[in-house]
Image: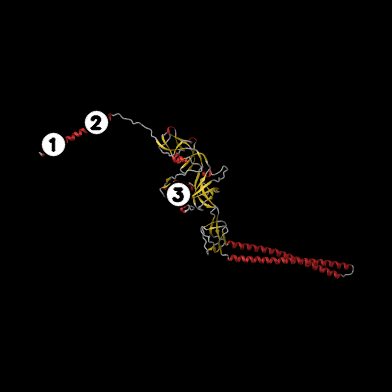
């Protein structure tokens, strides 16, 4: 009985399974038949509309700026050197690094013992020469008096001879008296000749005495100059740098003891490309005195200065490109010679110019604008300047149109869009030439070769301050580097 019961249950399960299989096969075949016999339905196509940010292209007058790097220099720098060797006996309290001195201050003095002795000897020699000159002048006066007396004696002898001859003609005098008178006249004339020789010698002594006095004066002036050279005097108001002198130290001739820098006469030297230099020239080919703004950016602090371009270098320089330009700083609080600063040079104003983001310009020099039925149109424009992440354009068909601020590969002429006015860019269109928009910094991913070149240039730059160099190297070591830093460094490299 047990076997029969289990057999009946197994047959029942087999029957149920077979029935379910038959039902399933019927459902599948019906679905396949319905799918095959069903007519295909074509979906309705709709045009895709993209949302884009736009800005009104309003022409205005804009003053472009050339952004470069430069180095602050002093227009007046003086090396303080020792003219002779010796021991430093005196050093001023201000004669130290960063000491503030005024014109005429005594900064240091070398041992003056030998120079003072030489000056005393020169004064003694001059006094001796003056005494000798007085003696020769007195001798000259005596020689003149003796010659005058000798001339008088000749006159007396001549008259005596005439008188003796007259007496002899009348028979009163004798021939011996006449001969004696003639001998006396000859002796008097010989005496005159001797006095003339003495007078000539006295006059020659006067010339020699004058020469000796002149030589003594020269020696005295030289001794005074040598004594003055032992004193180091500040020639103008300034600040001392690179001070290496210590009191009691032995210095050699022409050794530099310090450097005197005028902090009020600063200038900045910066290099621009040839194209940028051409935009700074006048119609006559002269360098225009353009305004410059200098900034030393530190962590959370910026030192600002104003200036005017004064001159440019006479030659390009070996291995250099572009032009080296100098600008005189009128107000430079806090800046020091040697500072590595950023320089913004104001160009001539451009009229009828449209300012747009750089992303609005495609490689073919075209801008997409919103046309009829909100469809995009491509307009060719003239690129005038690049200012950070913005471009200055000029095109007659662009004036007053809504320009797309960000191009993507999906956008092109004929695409229908939904324009959204960019509020930030709308504010930028209202900027004037005196208030340019601040560019938003972009980040770049550098190749290893490009990164290595930039870091090597910064490390080998001896004129860049250590703090600034460390900051730039930290930026270059990051995965993404600010585009402005890369651009300024490559301009500095001449690339």
Q: Earlier in the sequence, mark 2 or mark 3?
A: 2
Q: Which of marks 1 and 2 is nearer the N terminus?
A: 1
The answer to whether one can see residue 132 in this image is yes
Q: Which of marks 1 and 3 is nearer the N terminus?
A: 1
Secondary structure, mark 1, is helix
**CB-based contact (under 8 Å), mark 2 and mark 3:** no
The quarter of the picture where the N terminus appears is top left
Marks 1 and 3, how far apart at CA: 92 Å
The answer to whether residue 444 is above or below residue 117 is: above
The residue lying at 87 percent from left, 67 percent from top is: 166
Secondary structure, mark 3, is helix
Give the x, y percent position of residue 303.
Answer: 49, 50
The answer to whether one can see residue 325 in this image is no
Residue at which label 1 appears: 8
Marks 1 and 2, how far apart at CA: 33 Å
Foreground pick, 491 / 429: 429
The answer to whether residue 449 is above or below residue 204 is: above
Position of 39 compared to 290: left or right?
left
Marks 2 and 3, how far apart at CA: 74 Å
Foreground pick, 205 / 86: 86
Characterize the local packing of mark 2: few (<14), some (14-19) or many (20 or more) Cα atoms within 10 angstroms: few
Give the x, y percent position of residue 179.
Answer: 84, 69
| Quarter where residue 117 is shown | bottom right
Foreground pick, 439 / 142: 439
Instruction: Name the image colouring.
Output: secondary structure
- The label shown at residue 30 is 2
Foreground pick, 431 / 70: 431
Give the x, y percent position of residue 289.
Answer: 55, 46
Residue at which label 3 appears: 454
Secondary structure, mark 2, is helix
**CB-based contact (under 8 Å), mark 1 and mark 3:** no
């Amino acid at each position: 009985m047990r076997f029969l019961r289990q057999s009946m249950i197994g047959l029942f399960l087999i029957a149920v399974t077979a029935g379910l299989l038959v039902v399933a096969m019927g459902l599948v075949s019906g679905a396949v038949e319905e799918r095959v016999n069903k007519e295909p339905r074509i979906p309705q196509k709709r045009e895709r509309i993209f949302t884009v940010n736009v800005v009104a292209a309003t022409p205005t007058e804009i003053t472009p700026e050339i952004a470069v790097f430069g180095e602050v220099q002093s227009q007046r720098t003086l090396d303080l050197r020792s003219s002779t060797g010796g021991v430093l006996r005196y050093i001023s309290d201000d004669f130290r690094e960063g000491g503030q001195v005024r014109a005429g201050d005594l900064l240091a003095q070398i041992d003056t013992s030998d120079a003072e002795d030489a000056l005393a000897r020169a004064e003694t020699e001059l006094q001796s020469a003056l005494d000798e000159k007085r003696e020769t002048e007195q001798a000259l006066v005596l020689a003149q008096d003796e010659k005058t007396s000798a001339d008088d004696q000749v006159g007396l002898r001549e008259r005596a001879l005439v008188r003796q001859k007259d007496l002899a003609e009348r028979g009163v005098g004798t021939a011996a008296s006449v001969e004696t008178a003639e001998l006396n006249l000859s002796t008097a004339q010989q005496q005159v000749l001797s006095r003339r020789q003495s007078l000539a010698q006295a006059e020659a002594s006067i010339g020699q005495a004058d020469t000796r006095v002149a030589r003594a004066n020269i020696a005295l002036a030289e001794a005074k100059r040598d004594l003055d050279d032992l004193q180091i005097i500040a020639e103008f108001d300034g600040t001392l740098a690179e001070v290496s002198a210590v009191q009691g130290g032995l210095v050699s001739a022409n050794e530099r003891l310090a450097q005197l820098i005028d902090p009020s006469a600063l200038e900045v030297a910066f290099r621009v490309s040839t194209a940028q230099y051409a935009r700074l020239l006048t119609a006559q080919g002269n360098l225009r005195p353009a305004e410059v703004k200098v900034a030393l950016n530190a962590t959370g602090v910026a030192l600002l200065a104003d200036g005017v371009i004064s001159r440019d270098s006479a030659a390009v320089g070996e291995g250099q490109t572009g032009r080296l330009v100098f600008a005189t700083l009128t107000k430079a609080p806090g800046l020091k010679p040697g500072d590595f600063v950023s320089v913004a040079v104001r160009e001539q104003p451009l009229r009828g110019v449209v300012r747009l983001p750089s992303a609005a310009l495609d490689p073919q020099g075209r801008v997409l604008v919103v046309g009829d039925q909100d469809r995009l149109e491509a307009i060719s424009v003239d690129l005038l300047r690049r200012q950070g992440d913005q471009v200055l354009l000029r095109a007659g068909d662009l004036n007053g149109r809504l320009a797309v601020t960000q191009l993507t590969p999906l956008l092109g002429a004929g695409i229908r869009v939904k324009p959204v006015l960019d509020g930030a860019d709308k504010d930028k269109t209202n900027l004037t030439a005196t208030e340019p928009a601040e560019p938003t910094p972009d980040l770049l991913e550098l190749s290893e070769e490009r990164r290595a070149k930039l870091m090597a240039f910064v490390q080998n730059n001896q004129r860049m301050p250590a703090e600034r160099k460390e900051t730039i190297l930290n930026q270059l070591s990051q995965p993404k580097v600010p585009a402005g830093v890369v651009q300024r460094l490559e301009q500095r490299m001449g690339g």
